[in-house]
Image (tube, rainbow, N blue to C red):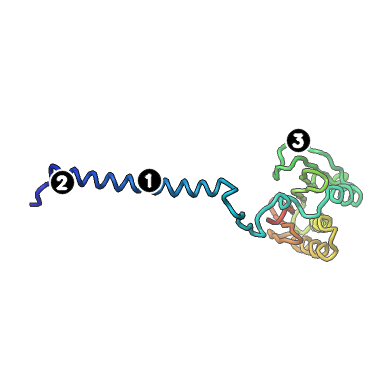
């Protein structure tokens, strides 16, 4: 049998353990203080670390180059005779935009072909969605989706054609692509195309 320690030997062992724990705590606290001081006092830093080119910025919340007037006035109203107005009652936007417009097709198609535009102001569009209630294969859906993609990239002739062709070809699929900084996503259920910033 190993004899149990008692008396001064046991007290010294306990003191040694306690002392090592205290020293570890002091060391950890000291390194934490140094790190905290250097990272929260700008004058102690010689330069900020570089940021990646892909780091999200405020502008990346918006569809690049898209203007409300081009979408609503030119494409929806002038070219297709849609009626556009804020929703009643106003609801929360999907993209947290400040404003939203609902555009309805003319005549009997007003509940079959709809477009939603969410935006903060004229030059800051966050989200565009077109819905088509017709079954896959309907020309109305492929035409709506293709002309929407075309309108959103109207400032670039080459990308405009690419977007039009892609949306027309993929109108009856579950598919997505990115063109000109805009992510287009087509869904069959519900039958729709969504345009969002490509982040």
Identify residue for label 2: 9
Lower position in the chain sequence, tag 3 or tag 1: 1
Q: State the residue at coordinates (15%, 43%).
A: 8
Q: Position of residue 27 (x, y in %)?
A: 39, 49
Label 2 crowd bin: few (<14), some (14–19), many (20+), radius 10 Å = few
- Outermost left residue: 1
Q: Is residue 3 left or right of residue 154?
A: left
| Of residues 5 and 164, the one drawn nearer to the viewer in this rendering | 5
- Residue 140 visible to the viewer: no
Lower position in the chain sequence, tag 2 or tag 1: 2
Tell me the SS state at disc 1.
helix
Q: Are marks 2 and 3 in contact (CB under 8 Å)?
A: no
- Outermost right residue: 78
Instruction: Tell which tag, 3 or 1, sits nearer the viewer.
Output: 1
Quarter in which the C terminus is drawn: bottom right
Q: Is residue 35 left or right of residue 53?
A: left
Identify residue for label 3: 90
| Of residues 74 and 9, the one drawn nearer to the viewer in this rendering | 9
Task: Check residue 26 in the rendering and tell me which mark sits there, or answer none.
Answer: 1
Number of numbered callouts drawn: 3
Task: Check residue 34 in the rendering and tell me which mark sits there, or answer none.
Answer: none
Q: State the residue at coordinates (66%, 58%).
A: 54
Q: Position of residue 80 (x, y in %)?
A: 89, 50
Instruction: Tell which tag, 2 or 3, sits nearer the viewer.
Output: 2
Q: For marks 2 and 3, give the CA distance.
A: 79 Å
Label 3 crowd bin: few (<14), some (14–19), many (20+), radius 10 Å = few
Lower position in the chain sequence, tag 2 or tag 3: 2
Tell me the SS state at disc 3.
loop
Q: Position of residue 118 (x, y in %)?
A: 76, 45
Q: Position of residue 148 (x, y in %)?
A: 81, 55
Q: Is residue 187 left or right of residue 75?
A: left
């Amino acid at each position: 049998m190993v004899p149990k320690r008692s008396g001064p030997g046991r007290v010294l062992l306990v003191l040694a353990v306690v002392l090592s724990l205290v020293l570890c705590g002091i060391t950890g606290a000291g390194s934490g203080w140094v790190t905290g001081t250097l990272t929260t006092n700008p004058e102690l830093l010689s330069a900020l670390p570089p940021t990646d080119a892909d780091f999200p910025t405020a502008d990346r919340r918006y569809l690049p180059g898209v203007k409300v007037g081009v979408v609503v006035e030119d494409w929806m109203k002038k070219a297709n005779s849609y009626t556009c107005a804020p929703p009643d009652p106003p609801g929360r936007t999907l993209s947290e935009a400040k404003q939203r417009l609902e555009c309805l097709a003319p005549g009997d198609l007003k509940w079959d072909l709809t477009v939603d535009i969410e935006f903060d102001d004229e030059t800051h569009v966050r989200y565009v969605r077109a819905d088509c209630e017709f079954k896959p294969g309907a020309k109305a859906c492929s035409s709506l989706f293709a002309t929407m993609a075309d309108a959103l990239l109207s400032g670039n002739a080459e990308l405009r054609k690419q977007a039009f062709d892609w949306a027309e070809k993929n109108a009856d699929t579950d598919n997505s692509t990115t063109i000109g900084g805009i992510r287009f996503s087509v869904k069959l259920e519900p039958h729709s195309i969504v345009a969002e910033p490509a982040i």
